[in-house]
Amino acid sequence: MMMNLFSVFDPSTSIFNLSINWMSTLSGFFIVPMMFWLLPSRYIMIWSSMLSTLHQELKLLLYSYQNLGATLIFLSLFTFILCNNFLGLFPYIFTSSSHLSMTLTLALPLWLSFLIYGWLNHTQHMFAHLMPQGTPPALMPFMVCIETISNLIRPGTLAIRLAANMIAGHLLLTLLGNTGPFISMPITSILIISQMALLMLESAVAIIQAYVFTILTTLYASEI
């Protein structure tokens, strides 16, 4: 029985004064599809098909029909988050995407780079974006304040959404797992089935959260 429910998210495990829990973030690089195979495996074919579909969707959001590399950063972001979300579902692997120190590191630089680029190169468009079309004159000052605040909290909402969704499922799995030694065998069978169903749900959440983070970041970039 763990002393603290949130100890599963503690990154303090260290060897030689190095926090080795964060090394799980780089574990996704070991399962990158091998591009030098004579024939592609089923894994590579499924992954290529998924990335191709996502590329077509992101291209429509960015209106980039000529620049074929415009979606590369967002596809890389999706792959990175998805790998870390899935790795956190395995036993004894640290879930780095459940910490704000990682999610905010992903969201803040992207949002800040889009914002700086927009204000430096499309200043008039950025000013116009603060005032939705058809706003009554009496509401214009309030709309400017509301749009400014909504733009400023975007990196926080991106980071908190991803971290909170990953924490919630892991906490529920931990709570159910801690009750196992204190219940009877028939109820334990029901508990195992419930945890298997919840693990499948968490797998879907891992994909959905990586997709939502990528799509929202793409939408923020398309406004510039």
Image (cartoon, rainbow, N blue to C red):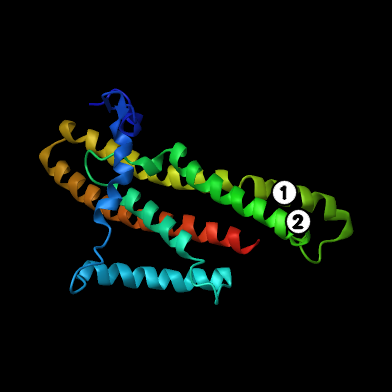
* Image x and y of residue 220, in percent: 60, 58
**Above or below, 92 relative to 162:** above
Which residue is at 46% across, 74% downward? Answer: 56
Which residue is at 32% across, 25% downward? Answer: 4
Q: Which mark is residue 148?
A: 1
Which residue is at 42% across, 46% downward? Answer: 165
**Above or below, 171 relative to 71:** above
Which residue is at 35% across, 30% downward? Answer: 6
| Residue 157 visible, this angle | no
| Residue 21 visible, this angle | yes
The three-letter code of the residue at mark 2 reads Leu
Q: Are marks 2 and 1 in contact (CB under 8 Å)?
A: yes
As drawn, the residue found furthest toward the front would be 36
User: Which quadrant of the figure contains the N terminus?
Assistant: top left
Image side of residue 220 versus residue 29, left or right: right
Image side of residue 89 versus residue 129, left or right: left
Instruction: Pick the residue in front: 180 or 159.
Output: 159
The three-letter code of the residue at mark 1 reads Thr
Q: Which residue position is annotated with label 2? A: 130
Quick one: label 2, few (<14), some, or many (20+) residues within 10 Å?
A: some
Q: Which mark is residue 204?
A: none
